[in-house]
Image (tube, helix red, strand yellow):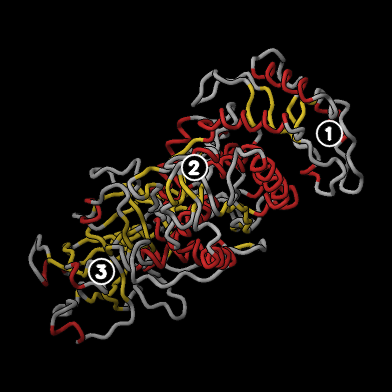
């Protein structure tokens, strides 16, 4: 995939979000709006200059966990649309819940966005924001609603509010506190702020319509009491805004033009619009107001994205942490060997639509395979090593002879040069490359058959050695002289089988972690099923392998194609030059279930 800012990149596929933005740009919906240089209310922006950005989008995660692949799509979508249409995407932390948010998650989210290739900087300014920095303005907005009769303090219990909310077929019932005077509402709300009332004793509710067919409009709670220290504001506040109240205000203060979220927020859009219109009527917010648009979230088979369930996997040590390569977290995908370009390609190919569909996991793997094919150096490795002894080595050459061999670093990039390694009298091959009694069509090593050691000589198998239990411990073969690859005699003997190998004396022992899908079912928690009941017991296998000497020089995060096996990455945590560790990123082809 071409780089995000490559001018030669093909035009992205059309989708309904692009159509909306193109229409807004054509009609000049946001052309004349001012920008105050930072988020703020209507007066702040009125004193500013014409907005230098054609559109403003935002990526608004709550810092209460590690981002997963679904977030990666949202990042690529929001930042990508801003990039493509001459705008900016704000990096905003929706940190309105003091009990679940931590600086660790803030740092990991910022790192994930940068790693994916995006930035919140534009025109010399940083657009990194925190919802908690707007708490004063949100409080002003709440008092504005109360003063104009659009909000009230409700002292019903949670059970009473739930019972009076109604159902999908029955309207809700008005709270007995719904008609309390404005002055009393203001007084009690200020007492809430001053910490004079216990948690759960009351909430501030918007006064909308208890008979609305949309339950989200039946006087939603917009402020609650929480005596909890906030990671950003400390103990300044003991009342905190609800997400459905805070989010539209954050968008408006930041002059977001297109607020893009997933379909589960579609039913919240009427309240989003209602709230912004009420605050604009009071002069707190300015037109044009943000508009919310929903797209279908990424539903990928064989994974789960519930933060609670992912945390359970970590807490119960079913996986080795948030960055376990089996996890769908961005840190896990990165450690597995996924590249920013492969995830951008997935986001582009799955597009944005209004319909929920399931994307097969093989699509994700295909994106990585396609990206790594053109950018990874090749190397040989024996993952299930079996010793091959070349019994006539000393006769053909001389005792202790080392035969230099070379191979392209990449078959399609001659300018990348060659890699060098040596063929010696004993090498490691794959155990599957030898059969004492070969099945029909087997072309590699069996007594009496010839095959080529890749980049080296043709050899003829003469037999094998076994242990007391009858297990093959070594394959025996003879070198066919004057058949080395790249020499005039290379074609003098025709063979159908070619096998990879690693010198037994010069190869480097390496730990290789073979990863597979974490679950055996495409939808692990479908129908309320216990997702732990369908864990894949073979999702991680650790083996001792032998690798070509040059691979041991890899640095953490370096990626390679192990010829015939797949794409591997040097583990970013455990890999060392004297003790290499490689993770399987993806095989050379999709073999799941085949």
Using the image as rendered, state which of residue 181 and residue 161 is in the foreground.
181
Which label lies toward us, 2 or 1?
2
Query: Which of the two labelled residues, at mark 2 and mark 1, occupies the earlier sequence position?
Result: 2
Looking at the image, which residue is at 74% across and 47% down?
528
Q: Is residue 362 visible?
A: no
In the image, is 62 to the left or to the right of 198? left
Label 3 secondary element = loop
How far apart are the alpha carbons under marks 3 and 1? 64 Å
Circles 2 and 1, Cβ within 8 Å, touching? The answer is no
Residue 352 at x, y percent in the picture:
58, 63
Looking at the image, which residue is at 26% across and 86% down?
494
Query: Which of the two labelled residues, at mark 3 and mark 2, occupies the earlier sequence position?
Result: 2
Dot 1, how many residues are within 10 Å of its Cα: few (below 14), some (14-19), or many (20+)?
few
**Quadrant containing the N terminus in the rendered view:** bottom left
Using the image as rendered, state which of residue 5 and residue 192 is in the foreground.
192
Label 1 secondary element = helix
User: For residue 551, which quarter of the picture?
Assistant: bottom left
Looking at the image, which residue is at 73% across and 33% down?
148
How far apart are the alpha carbons under marks 2 and 1? 40 Å
Task: Give the residue number, with chain letter if any, for mark 3.
Answer: 410
Which label lies toward us, 3 or 2?
2
Which residue is situated farthest in the right direction here? Answer: 170
Which residue is situated farthest in the left direction here? Answer: 398
Task: Give the residue number, with chain letter if any, for mark 2.
Answer: 45
Task: Give the residue number, with chain letter if any, for mark 1.
Answer: 162
Residue 225 at x, y percent in the picture:
68, 22
User: For residue 504, which quarter of the picture?
Assistant: bottom left
Query: Which of the two labelled residues, at mark 3 and mark 1, occupies the earlier sequence position?
Result: 1
């Amino acid at each position: 995939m071409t780089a995000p800012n490559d001018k030669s990149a093909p035009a992205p596929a059309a989708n309904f979000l692009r159509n909306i933005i193109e229409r807004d740009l054509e009609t000049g919906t946001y052309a004349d709006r001012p920008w105050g240089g930072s988020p703020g209310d209507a007066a702040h922006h009125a004193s500013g200059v014409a907005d230098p950005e054609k559109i403003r989008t935002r990526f608004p995660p709550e810092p209460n966990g590690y981002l997963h692949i679904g977030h990666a799509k949202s990042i690529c979508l929001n930042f990508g649309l801003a990039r493509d249409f001459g705008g900016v995407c704000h990096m905003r932390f929706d940190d309105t819940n003091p009990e679940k948010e931590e600086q660790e998650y803030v740092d990991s989210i910022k790192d994930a966005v940068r790693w994916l290739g995006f930035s919140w900087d534009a025109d010399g300014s940083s657009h990194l924001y925190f919802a908690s920095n707007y708490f004063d303005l949100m409080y002003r907005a709440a008092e504005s609603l109360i003063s104009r009769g659009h909000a009230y303090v409700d002292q019903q219990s949670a059970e009473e509010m739930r019972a009076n909310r109604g159902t999908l077929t029955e309207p809700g019932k008005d709270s007995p506190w719904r008609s309390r005077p404005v002055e009393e509402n203001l007084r009690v709300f200020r007492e809430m702020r001053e910490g004079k009332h216990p948690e759960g004793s009351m909430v501030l509710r918007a006064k909308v319509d208890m008979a609305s067919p949309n339950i989200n409009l039946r006087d939603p709670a917009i402020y609650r009491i929480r005596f909890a220290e906030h990671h950003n504001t400390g103990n300044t506040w003991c009342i905190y805004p609800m997400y459905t109240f805070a989010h539209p205000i954050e968008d408006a203060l930041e002059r977001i033009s297109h607020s893009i979220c997933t379909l589960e927020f579609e039913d919240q859009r009427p309240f989003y619009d209602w709230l912004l219109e009420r605050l604009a009527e009071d002069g707190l917010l300015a037109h044009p107001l943000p508009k919310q648009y929903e797209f279908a979230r990424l539903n990928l088979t064989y994974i789960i994205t519930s933060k609670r369930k992912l945390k359970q996997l970590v807490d119960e040590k079913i996986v080795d942490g948030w960055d376990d390569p089996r996890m769908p977290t961005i840190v896990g995908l990165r450690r597995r060997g996924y590249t920013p370009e492969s995830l951008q390609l997935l986001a582009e190919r799955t597009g944005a639509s209004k319909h929920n569909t399931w994307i097969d996991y093989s699509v994700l793997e295909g994106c990585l395979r396609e990206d790594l094919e053109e950018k990874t150096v090749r190397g040989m490795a024996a993952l299930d090593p079996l010793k091959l002894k070349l019994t006539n080595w000393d006769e053909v050459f001389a005792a202790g002879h080392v035969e230099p061999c070379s191979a392209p670093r990449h078959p399609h990039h001659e300018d990348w040069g060659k890699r060098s390694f040596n063929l010696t009298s004993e090498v490691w091959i794959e155990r599957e490359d030898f059969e004492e009694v070969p099945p029909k069509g087997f072309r590699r090593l069996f007594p009496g058959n010839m095959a080529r050691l890749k980049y080296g000589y043709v050899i003829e198998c003469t037999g094998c050695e076994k242990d007391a239990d009858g297990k093959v411990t070594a394959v025996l073969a003879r070198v066919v002289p004057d058949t080395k690859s790249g020499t005039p005699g290379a074609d003098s003997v025709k063979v159908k089988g070619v096998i990879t190998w690693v010198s037994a004396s010069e190869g480097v022992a390496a730990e290789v972690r073979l990863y597979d899908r974490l679950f055996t079912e495409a939808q692990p928690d479908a129908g309320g099923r216990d997702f732990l009941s369908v864990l894949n017991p073979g999702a991680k296998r650790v083996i001792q392998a032998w690798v070509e000497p040059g691979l041991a020089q890899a640095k953490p995060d370096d990626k390679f194609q192990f010829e015939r096996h797949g794409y591997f990455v040097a583990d970013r945590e455990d890999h060392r030059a004297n003790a290499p560790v490689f993770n399987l990123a993806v095989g050379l082809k999709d073999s799941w279930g085949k």
